[in-house]
Amino acid sequence: MFDLPCVLFAGGKSSRMGQDKSLLPFGDSTTLAEYQYRRLAPLFHNVYISSKEPDKFGFDAALILDPEGVDYAPTAGFVSTFRTVDADRVMVLSVDTPFVDEEIFRALIDADSPEVDAVIAKTPSGTHPMCGIYHRSLLLEMERMLEEGDHRLGKLLASSNTRYVMFDDEERFANLNHPHEYQAALSRSCEPDR
């Protein structure tokens, strides 16, 4: 079990999917959020779900709610996380990346060290800001960004002491943003060895 908390970000708008993707059925679970929560719970000391709504999920999970009146933005979730969770670093994962696995988490944790602000997954297609470790050292800047309505995580990471960990397999970082991506992921989740 990894000795840091994991926060599953499930407070997005899902505008490209056309419906709340965290509530879509997935694998052997009623919802994608539940599927992710159940597979992460054995791996991490604590697992939380970052959300805008307190009654959104039909299963027991520790929630971290966004501040009220804030846009759909991960910066709100980060600020609430560090105000709520008593930890100097957290693993974060977007709810719509169901194939990020224990091997990836281990590589990110192994690359982490106290002098960095973040450790972020990277593939040939680019960086994956919603798959990585964030340190409390970023909280003040995140609060400033939230206050100013600036939600560009890439900009935050570029101006911070960020370590990137390269992975070659793009498929494990597949995002379920559109209906066709969701359907493809459903097919993959039914394959043997998954």
Image (tube, grey):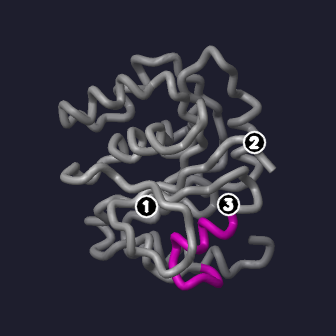
Magenta region:
27-40
Label of residue 10 in the image: 1
Amino acid type, label 3:
Leu
Amino acid type, label 1:
Ala
Residue at 67% in and 60% down = 40
Judging depth in this view, the residue of 133 and 188 nearest the camera is 133
Quickly name the residue at label 2. Answer: 3
What is the quadrant of residue 116 in the picture? Answer: top right
Q: Could you say where residue 76 lies in the image, as x and y percent from the top left?
A: 33, 44
Q: Is residue 33 magenta?
A: yes
Which quadrant is the C terminus positioned in?
A: bottom right
Image vertical order of residue 44 relative to residue 141, above or below: below
What is the quadrant of residue 15 in the picture? Answer: bottom left
Residue at 29% in and 49% down = 67
What element does badge 2 sit on?
Answer: loop
What element does badge 1 sit on?
Answer: loop
Q: Earlier in the sequence, mark 1 or mark 2?
A: 2
Residue at 61% in and 49% down = 6
What element does badge 3 sit on?
Answer: helix
Q: Could you say where residue 21 lies in the image, as x and y percent from the top left?
A: 40, 71
Judging depth in this view, the residue of 79 and 115 nearest the camera is 79
